[in-house]
Image: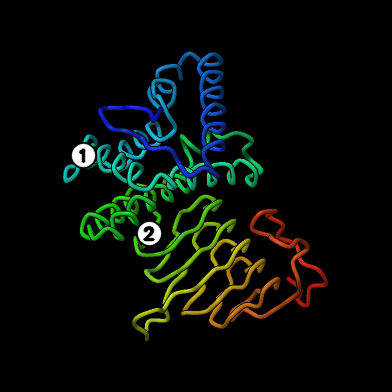
Amino acid sequence: MPGHENNVVFLPVEDAARGAVAALWETLRQEAGAAAQRDQALARAMNSAVLMHASFGHALSHRLAIKLSDHDVDRDELLALIHGAYTDRPGLLGAAAADLEAVKDRDPCNTEVLTPFLYFKGFSALQAYRVGHWLWTTGRRHLARHVQSRISEAFAIDIHPAAVMGRGIMLDHGSGLVIGETAVVEDEVSILQNVTLGGTGKETGDRHPKVRRGVLIGAGAKILGNIEVGIGAKVGAGSVVVTPVAPYTSVVGVPARPVGKPHTALPGVTMDQTLSEPEYMI
């Protein structure tokens, strides 16, 4: 049976993701319980953030509502709003679970799901964006803009609610990240801090990058214009990319140019930042 929290019914996520969400929720609860036992100073926090809730959706809704509430839209209003998104689009919970697993698997400083759920602003900002995107696509665009603004203020991350983001995405650190209105980021992409997926300043309409599956984008990279970064490509830190990047190609520099091939098929998953046969020297 679907769970009932605060008189809101959480519908089940799609069949392919239901088991993953349930397994992640059980892991999250176990990690929170262990953290509370290890340090009694965290007992109240673990109970409030995880253990008191009946489902992953309810816990995530509560966490985002606390982070994003302000004078204009308070916590209870946001909680109802996020509940509405998860009820209408159950797949959002499957995407959140995939994102959380991605952080656990790819971030070398973290081996659990509890820490990113509680503290990593890249994960929180991405889940808040998903709610804003739901608002945007259902015609509630001023409220979507409000959520976008609060994400920027709370997390220093600016993702336009019309942008399209896949699943299993890691926004590592996240600070200074900007993703424009017509950008597309596909599944299993990893993006480090201070990255811009922006326009060139001269165009209207479809004007932002299309980042394909498994891409890794290094810190400080700027990818500008309606260009494609092909599947399995890698963009080096500090690069400025203004022309398309072929699949399974590494580019670096200002402007960026090809310098080799990634060692792995999907560097966004493996986080392998090395190059084979580099054509440049630092």
Residue that badge 2 annotates: 158
Which quarter of the picture shows residue 63?
A: top left
Quick check: 259 left or right of 198?
A: right
Residue at point 62%, 69% (across, down): 235
Looking at this view, is 80 or 267 the one in front?
Answer: 80
Q: CA distance from mark 1 to mark 2?
A: 22 Å
Name the quarter where the C terminus is drawn: bottom right
Which quarter of the picture shows residue 2?
A: top left
Above-or-below relation of 23 to 210: above
Quick check: 94 left or right of 264?
A: left
Q: State the image coordinates of residue 228 (x, y, percent, origin top left).
A: 55, 76
Name the quarter where the N terminus is drawn: top left
Q: State the image coordinates of residue 255 (x, y, percent, origin top left).
A: 59, 81
Q: State the image coordinates of residue 111 (x, y, percent, origin top left).
A: 64, 35
Above-or-below relation of 135 to 276: above
Kind of residue indicated by mark 1:
Glu
Above-or-below relation of 64 to 243: above
Q: Find numbered disc 1 in the image and state the secondary structure of the residue it sits on.
A: helix
Which mark identifies residue 250? none
Kind of residue indicated by mark 2:
Asp
Looking at this view, is 92 or 142 the one in front?
Answer: 92
Q: Find numbered disc 2 in the image and state the secondary structure of the residue it sits on.
A: strand
Residue at point 46%, 59% (across, down): 165
First reached walking from the N terminus: tag 1 or tag 2? 1
Residue at point 28%, 52% (across, down): 147
Do labels 1 and 2 touch, CB within 8 Å? no
Which mark identifies residue 77? 1
Residue at point 67%, 66% (across, down): 232
